[in-house]
Image: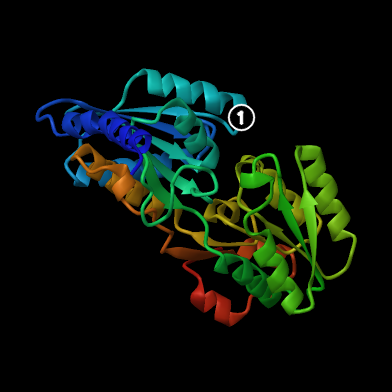
Amino acid sequence: MKRREFISLIGGAAAVWPLAVRAQEPGRMRRVGVLLALFDSDPEGQPRIAAFQRELESLGWTEGRNIQIEYRWASGDADRFRDLAAELVETRPDVVVGHTSASAEALARETRTIPIIFTMVTDPVASGLAASLTEPGRNATGFTNFEPSLGAKWVEFLREFSPRLARVGLLFNPATAPGRISSYQQFVEAAARSVAVDPIVATVSSAAQIEDAITTLSRRPDSGLIVMPDVFMTKHHDLIAALAIRHGLPAVYPFRYFAEGGGLFSYGFDVADIFRRTAGYVDKVLRGAMPGNLPVQHPDKFELVINMKTARALHLDVPRILLARANEVIE
């Protein structure tokens, strides 16, 4: 090994060693910062925080007794991600949690020493957060929200609802999608073409463009909609679901709250479970584990939620096979 490389390696390790020693100090109040991509008023925020805190408590960390957790809400705003990440890092917490790629990347730009546990990050290697999934090797590790098979499932389930499906719109905002392209796009397009369904990319960056895209798609018979997962779609989930119903467009969504808010059906990973598992990694780091030694993990729990009221409004017959597979049916 070259002398310069050796010095760099030792220097990098030395920057992290004090964190491990500090994490093991008995009786000290531990401090955790959490940067969420949502609005503080978003109803989805509280269930995620609740799952996170419940798991921490089950692992021995009680808010106000031996742990203090500070939350920041970026509201999907690029400038707020940067500002709030800097604000959290300045408080010198023991661990920071970054929700979504934008949060995790903002935190990583602010610190190379404070452990970062990311959650719902699409591609941590391409984002520079981890050297590899099995051996992240840096000060960050966590949980992805990427599972390629979801793309095929969205097409499959949408065809079950609409057997004559001829085309499907892929709705997302490139500005908030990692790498400025939906990570699921190629998988959805391949799945659609394999069953003679024409995939139509519908990129949007405002509420008006969402309305235009859905209106245009609905004018063509036998069309459907796949709402891709990104922060912008989450911000406008009520609007998207309402427009799809108004224009009689069968649509599949990536998260259960879309279906709970009136969307036809959702299929995706269990978000509360991801936050619960994130708390497990926070616990490990607080007890002295090095984030670079903890492998990045994928989602392993998925859920299908069907809104029967919306299905009736769209005059759709829900196949029995889907009802049998559903984790929840909303009447």
| Helix, strand or loop for disc 1 | loop
Vertical arrangement, residue 109 with respect to residue 233, above or below: above
Give the residue type that dot 1 points to: Asp
Question: Whole-percent x and y of residue 257?
Answer: 54, 51
Residue 123: give x, y in percent of width and height. 53, 51
Depth check: 191 or 75 in front? 191
Q: Is residue 291 visible?
A: yes
Q: The N terminus lies in which quarter of the figure?
A: top left
- What residue do we see at 32% from left, 21% from top? 92
The location of residue 33, given as percent across then percent down, is 36, 29
Q: Give the image quarter of residue 253.
A: bottom right
Q: Residues within 10 Å of mark 1 (few under 14, many from 20)?
A: some
- The foreground one among 11 and 5 is 5
Which of the image's four quarters has the C terminus? bottom right
Residue under numbered circle 1: 77
Q: Residue 244, image x and y in percent?
A: 75, 55
In this rendering, the answer to whether 4 lies above or below 283 is: above
Image vertical order of residue 176 relative to residue 325, above or below: above
**Residue 329 seen in the figure:** no
